[in-house]
Amino acid sequence: MQNNHHDINDDDWACIEHLLPGRVGGQGGVGKNNRLFIDAIRYLAKTSVAWSDLPYFYGNLTA
C-alpha cells in the first residue's frame, strides 16, 4: 500500500486498534484490514471525495 499523509500513524493506531470491531479474537466476523479502513475514512473526511472515488491503493473495501 502507498503511504500518504492521510494515513494514521503507528502511535495513534496503537491507541484505537483494540477498540475496533472485526478484529481477531472478537465476536462476529474478522475485518479484512481495519487499519486500511480507518485510513480510507480519514482520507474521505479530509478530502470530501465520494466513497466510490477513493484512490486505488485503498483497495476494494466494499467486498
Image: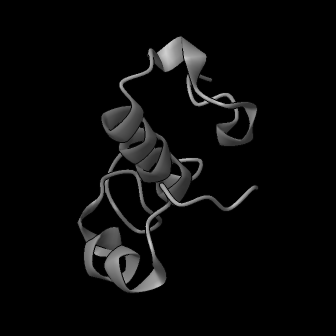
Q: How many marks?
A: 0
Quarter of the picture containing the N terminus is bottom right
Say above or below: 20 vs 16.
Answer: above
Q: Residue at x 47, y 65 (%)?
A: 24
- The colour scheme used to paint the residues is one colour
Give the image location of residue 27, x and y in percent.
31, 54
Give the image location of residue 31, x and y in percent.
50, 48
Left or right placement of residue 63 versus residue 5 in this view: right
Q: Residue at x 38, y 74 (%)?
A: 13
Is residue 35 visible to us here?
A: yes
Left or right placement of residue 61 versus residue 57 in this view: left
**Residue 44 in which image quadrant:** top left
**Residue 46 in which image quadrant:** top left
Say above or below: 61 vs 43.
Answer: above
Q: Nearer the viewer, residue 26 or 2?
A: 2
Q: Nearer the viewer, residue 54 or 38?
A: 54
Quarter of the picture containing the C terminus is top right
Say above or below: 17 vs 62.
Answer: below
Left or right placement of residue 52 versus residue 41 in this view: right
